[in-house]
Amino acid sequence: MELKEVLGRRRSIRFYLPHRPVEREKIQKMLEAARRASCVGNVGNTSAIVIWRRDASPELMQAITPPLGYQQMQTAPAFIFWYADTDAYQIDNWIERLCDLADQRRLGVDAEATKGLVNRALRPFFGAMWQEAAVSPLAMMDVGQAVAQATLIAYDEGLGTCLMSSPRLEQVAGLLELPATAIPVCIQSVGYPAESWEAGGQTKKRPFTDLFFENSHGASFVPDQAVDEELRSAKMLQDEAPLPWRDGGACVRDEGVGARR
């Protein structure tokens, strides 16, 4: 399956098969995809704790599952608690990662000269602002990129996922004994879907021209219809929800048969 079709078919899944466990190796693949995501200075600030329902304490499961809504939390056999670790930006760690990029020939031309420049010029500058950088929007964006890659791998492995925040996110973090350097970001439910990706159609989003602009705010980036058709042909754009037969819970009788479908 091509990437554009994967993007078009992915859905947030809220109903899972509770009797079907998620294989550990598939979770590992999701985590590896997250580890491979692009991030500032290769700091690697995205971390996660995998929670298996079968092993979780009643107290933890109660904290994960709010009393109203969140039906996906009732049936998912696994969860991933994603968080940003600000310690990754600690100045010595940050400089070490940059020097490592130089050694990999991913930064600069001459490795030793680049590392010398990093220590002379960047260490003083980053040393004065690393704590702010560790909680900046860019740092949180890197966590988002990592989670997005894990989400796509989950789909590729036949799994469904759903991301959510929670009014009890800090409580969950405490029960998981996260370090003081951790910033909880979200919980991701993971399991085998009990619903079809095609059942409801593609989720309707805000209009393209309301979200994206060209040269200045307010000047909408007007999409090319030919590109839209190309993306529809690639199955990245699909029929949006609700599909005509979505409300098929009502009884429909075939003439002469009287069967329900």
Image: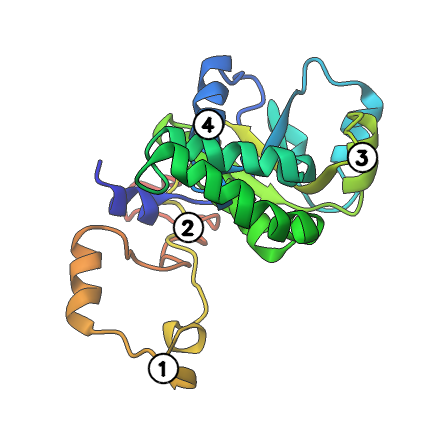
Find residue 257 and report its horizontal and vertical position in percent: 30, 40
Find residue 202 and report its horizontal and vertical position in percent: 38, 54
Instruction: Judge whether residue 84 can be spotted in this image.
Output: no
Q: Which residue is mark 4?
A: 30
Q: Which residue is mark 1?
A: 215
Q: Earlier in the sequence, mark 3 or mark 2?
A: 3
Tell me the crowding category of disc 3: few under 14, some 14 to 19, or many 20 or more residues within 10 angstroms, Cα based. few
In the rendered image, the vertical position of residue 209 relative to residue 181, given as above or below: below
| Identity of the residue drawn at 36% across and 48% down | 253
For residue 147, side relative to residue 153 (left or right): right
Provide the secondary structure element on which disc 3 rests: loop
In the rendered image, the vertical position of residue 247 relative to residue 193, given as above or below: below
Find residue 100 and report its horizontal and vertical position in percent: 45, 30
Residues under labels 1 and 2: Cα distance? 36 Å
Q: Are marks 4 and 1 in contact (CB under 8 Å)?
A: no
Q: Three-letter amino acid code at disc 1?
A: Asn
Q: Are marks 1 and 2 in contact (CB under 8 Å)?
A: no
The residue mark sitting in front, 4 or 1, is 1
Q: Which residue is mark 3?
A: 180
For residue 178, side relative to residue 153 (left or right): right
Query: Closer to the camera, 8 or 216?
Result: 216
Q: Which residue is mark 2?
A: 200
Residues under labels 4 and 2: Cα distance? 25 Å
| Identity of the residue drawn at 45% across and 25% down | 32
Q: Three-letter amino acid code at disc 4?
A: Met
